[in-house]
Amino acid sequence: VAAAQRLIAVQKRTGVPVLGGHHRRHNPIVKAARKLVREGGIGRLVAVTSLFLIRKPDDYFDVAWRREAGGGPVLINLIHDIDNLRFICGEIESVQAMTSNATRGFAVEDTAALVFRFENGALGTATVSDVTPTPWSWELSSGENKVYPQRDGLCYLLAGSEGSLSVPALDRWHYEGRQGWWEPLLRETLALAPLEPLAEQIRHFCAVIRGEEQPITDAADAARTLAVIEAVAEAARRGEPVTLDPTEG
């Protein structure tokens, strides 16, 4: 984050735009989820669940840095889910976390669990592991990257006072009329126009260079995602909640 702050200072001084590389913001699934939540389509956001549960092959760890602190799923993978959640749901205010390396025994974590509070009052959980075969991750459920065989699964569950949304399926669950657990839940699946997010990212990058668009993820925005990840590591190390500095970024 300190290095990001220096980059932000240079950007402010020179006026040269900086575009962070969080390509998932260009995915129509993420854009649709953000639009629904921000427009009140599920009411007041109450709770969020994020899952990154995947099995990395053993030879993935032949590279030494992937067995060392800083090379695990929190910094490498969770950071993308945190950015998605910030983009869809809003800023994260505080985090509490635990990590474990019990399965592989490397210096780096292979599993993590965290609880966080959003500035809007919603609470969230995230479970992260790269030692388990499941379909519950953005990589395997979204179909964004064809190198991962797509399976039916979910990675985010967004619960609101008037409805809920599953991602990437984009199933919106809600009641019609009287609300309560004895009433039948209705399901509405949001329609999407297909769009290749990496191609859209390049288009946007070129538009930023030409001065036609503002960065969807500027340096300050990207720094806030990184600040959450640093807070996760600090919370796990200290064994207590960490409140983020709202001035970072």
Image (cartoon, rainbow, N blue to C red):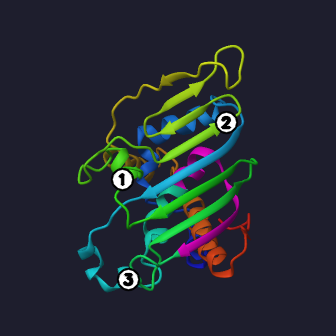
Mark 2 lies on residue: 160
The span shown in magenta is 83-99
In the rendering, at what x and y percent does residue 179 appear? 71, 21
Mark 1 lies on residue: 139
Q: Quadrant of residue 239?
A: bottom right
Residue 174 visible here: yes
Mark 3 lies on residue: 67
Q: Nearer the viewer, residue 175 or 11?
A: 175
Mark 2: amino acid: Gly
In reply to whether residue 86 is colored magenta, the answer given is yes
Q: Nearer the viewer, residue 4 or 187?
A: 187
SS class of the residue under badge 2?
Answer: strand
Cα separation, mark 3 vs mark 1, equals 21 Å
Which of pointers 1 and 2 lies earlier in the amino acid sequence? 1
Write the residue at 44% across / 65% down: 129
Write the residue at 47% across / 83% down: 69
